[in-house]
Structures are given as C-alpha cells and as structure tokens.
Image: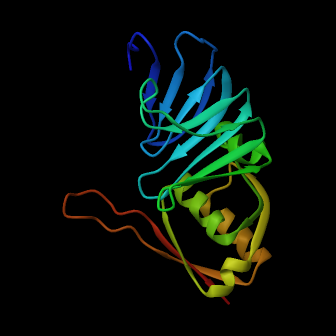
Amino acid sequence: PVIFNKHTRDVKLIGEAYFEVAENKEHPFIVNTGKIKVEVTGTEFKASNYPDENLTEIVLASGKVNLFQGEYSKNRNILGAMVPGEKATFYEEEGKVYFEKVEVDKYISWKEGILMFRDDSMPEVVRRLNRWFNVDIGLTGKALNDYVYTATFQDESLIQILDLLKMSAPINYTIKPRERKPDKTFSKMEIEIKQK
C-alpha cells in the first residue's frame, strides 16, 4: 500500500517475492498470503503463494519470522517461528506447516536470474519451470517421479534446459504450439515430458 495503517505494515502476496524488511517493533511488518501470515522482525526472506497451488512456502535467509493465522492484534494463532536456513511449507488441504533445514540459495537465487535445482524431483523441477517460463509442462510416466536433478541455469532458454534434462535422463518432450484464443490472446505453451 502507499500508506500503512497506524499499527502494522500489512502487505498481501499473490505469487513470489523476496523481502528485505527493516526492524520496527512499534509497527510490525505482516505478509498476508491468504492462507497464512508472516510476522517479520527485521529480516530477509522469500515467500511464495500461487493461486493454482495448494501450498505456501516461506524460506528465511536471515533474521526471524513468526507464522500465524487470524488477525495480528486479535485472535492470532501462532503456527511456529522460523530461524535462518529454514523453509516452512503450509499445505492448505492439511492446514499444517512443515519446517525443514534447506540450502537457502536454491530458493532465493531466482532474484539474481539463476534457476537452481539441488536433488529435486522431476515434479518439483516441472513446477518451478512452469513458474519461471509461464508454460504448462505435463509429465507422462510414473518413473519420471523418481528422477532427481541437480543443476544451475542462468540465461538458458526453456528449450536448452529441456535438452539438458533429456541428456541426463531417458526422457523425450513434445511442444504443442500456442493457439490464438477467441479473445485474440494466445494460450500458454504446452509441453509434455515422457519417459523413453
């Protein structure tokens, strides 16, 4: 917002953002993802909340954050506190938060234009490629779920990344061209990854 209210600094998040927040105990900074809220006490962190996913992720680079539901000043239900190097994943269907230690760079390198995978499953790789390139990638073949990737990409195109994935695992991919819709916009590029 252009102006914050008197008591808190509230922002709403749809998508993904990296925050660097100055400490101000009199006016806490609150990030509302719609599913959970993050109380920030002077810190750096990444938060992602996409409407088409049933999860919200928070990755803490430095400082401290508290996760909660409800209103900050009224019926706040604390879900947990985070320490640097931790990732919290809130699954909407379960209504639970899971905490784990992670390699923070993997989650925040995107702000420097770097796409990093570290022992990530093929479904996770696809999820992040879909976001990065605004495409729809589908997987065909159960064995694809068992493939794990470690790679760092900077300035590579989607086709270059798919070709590199194809070199490291027995997969093929096909691309469905974009189609013009009745409203004169174009559909997203659709890609199918199949196991050989």
Residue 6: give x, y in percent of width and height: 40, 9
Residue at 58%, 40% (x, y): give it.
47
* Viewer-proximal residue among 98 and 13: 98
What quarter of the picture does the N terminus occupy?
Answer: top left
Judge from the rendering whether residue 1 lies leftward or rightward of residue 93; answer left or right: left
Residue 186, compared with residue 105, is above or below; it is below
Residue 134: give x, y in percent of width and height: 48, 56
* Viewer-proximal residue among 29 and 171: 29
Q: How many marks?
A: 0
Residue 24: give x, y in percent of width and height: 60, 11
What quarter of the picture does the C terminus occupy?
Answer: bottom right
The single residue placed furthest to the left in the displayed view is: 182
Residue 36, compared with residue 3, is above or below; it is below
Residue 113, compared with residue 182, is above or below; it is above
Residue at 55%, 34% (x, y): give it.
38
Residue 145 in which image quadrant: bottom right
Residue at 68%, 54% (x, y): give it.
156
* Viewer-proximal residue among 6 and 140: 6
The single residue placed furthest to the bottom in the displayed view is: 196
Residue 179: give x, y in percent of width and height: 33, 68
Residue 22 in which image quadrant: top right
* Viewer-proximal residue among 17 and 173: 17
Q: How is the image coloured?
A: rainbow
Judge from the rendering whether residue 111 lies leftward or rightward of residue 85; answer left or right: left
